[in-house]
Image (spheres, helix red, strand yellow):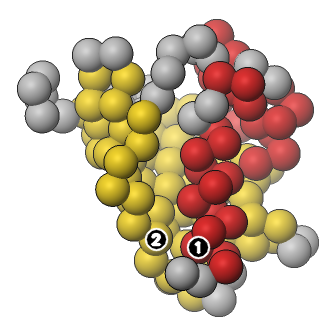
Amino acid sequence: MDEDFETVINSELELLTPGVRANDDAVRALLHEDFREFGASGTIWDRETVVHATRASSSTPIQADDLRPVRLGPDAILLTYTARMEDSTSLRTAIWIRADGAWKLRHHQGTRLPPGS
């Protein structure tokens, strides 16, 4: 697998771990300064609201399955996967860009799946 793909997948998985989610600086280090998310709930999030939300939900385990990276350009990767937490399943899309030599999450989208999916 491509080294950039491995870096992006590992960074996305870090954002799902309770230890990173509970650490504001660790979350900020992975998010681009212009980060934006369209949440599964329909909420639009920016970098700081996600930092606070991840801290508040840091104890909820999140499992990621079927991670698929696709290169959009030399410094952009689209990552799709299925996230499962408690009784909720969602499809996730993440766009990671390389900025100043580091991979940063620029955009994230979640789409809820019906129960039992």
Screen quadrant of the N terminus? bottom right
Residue at image location 63% in from the left, 17% down from the top: 58
Indicate the quadrant where residue 19 lies. Answer: top right
C-alpha span from label 1 to label 2 = 6 Å
Q: Is residue 9 above or below residue 39?
A: below
Residue at image location 34% in from the left, 16% down from the top: 86
Report if the CB atoms under discs 1 and 2 are less than 8 Å apart: yes
Q: Is residue 94 above or below residue 91?
A: below
Indicate the quadrant where residue 38 lies. Answer: top left
Residue at image location 67% in from the left, 79% down from the top: 3
Tell whether 91 sits left or right of 13: left
Q: Is residue 11 above or below residue 50?
A: below
Please indicate, yes or no, whether residue 94 appears anywhere in the rendered image: yes
Foreground of the two, 21 or 28: 21
Tell whether 37 sits left or right of 88: right
Q: Position of residue 36 (x, y in %)?
A: 59, 45
Find disc 1 in the rendering and name its residue: 5
SS for tag 1? Answer: helix
Indicate the quadrant where residue 14 lies. Answer: top right
Q: Return the mark for residue 69.
A: 2
- Amino acid of disc 2: Pro
Q: Is residue 97 above or below residue 44?
A: below
